[in-house]
Amino acid sequence: MILGRVKGNVVSTTKSEKLDGYKLLIVAPINIDTFKEQGAPVVSVDTVGAGEGEVVMVVGGSSSRQTAATQDRPVDSTIVAIIDSVNLDGRRIYDKFPQENG
């Protein structure tokens, strides 16, 4: 599993019938230590309703076909979660809904 940030989407009107109805998103991997984007983006099938700019969890390979939505489908990368927060070494390094001070 990796964390990544949704950067955009792919539109394909002609594709395998097993992918009809599935949203394809471009996800840039995130380095967990720095929380900065690192590496080549991938196209992932969205199973959770993610949107551009969101931090997501992505699975690849045979794991990407283990969801109810992707079983027996030609996928190699699947978004399986939208991330709310990440804590690392006792500190919060990402928060989708940051608390305002004051």
Image: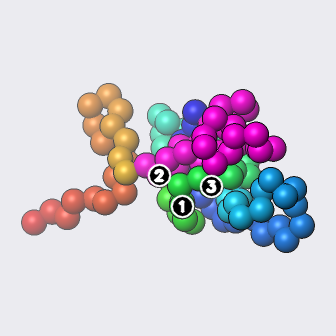
Numbered marks: total: 3
Which residue is identified by label 3? 46
The image quarter containing residue 65 is top right
The amino acid type of the residue labelled 1 equals Gly
Q: Tell me the CA gap for discs 2 and 3.
A: 10 Å
Q: Secondary structure at mark 1?
A: loop
Locate residue 4 relative to residue 98 in the image: left or right.
Answer: right
- Residue 78 seen: yes
**Taking 89 as reference, is 55 left or right?**
right
Q: Residue at x 83, y 67 (%)?
A: 12
Position of the C terminus, as image quadrant, is: bottom left
* Mark 2 / mark 3, whichever is N-terminal: 3
State which mark lies toward you, 2 or 1.
1
Say which residue label 1 marks.
49
Seen at 70% across and 60% down, the residue is: 22
The structure residue drawn at horizontal position 15% and vertical position 63%, both measured from the top left corner, is 101
Q: Are marks 2 and 1 in contact (CB under 8 Å)?
A: yes
Where residue 82 is drawn, which disc sits there?
A: 2
Q: Position of residue 41 (x, y in %)?
A: 71, 50
- For residue 4, above or below residue 65: below
The answer to the question of whether label 1 and label 3 lie on touching residues, with beta carbons closer than 8 A, is: yes
Q: Amino acid at mark 2?
A: Ile
- Separation of residues labelled 1 and 3 (CA atoms): 6 Å
Give, as a single range, the part of the protein colored magenta. 56-83
Question: Does dot 3 land on a helix, a strand or a loop?
Answer: strand
Q: CA distance from mark 2 to mark 1?
A: 8 Å
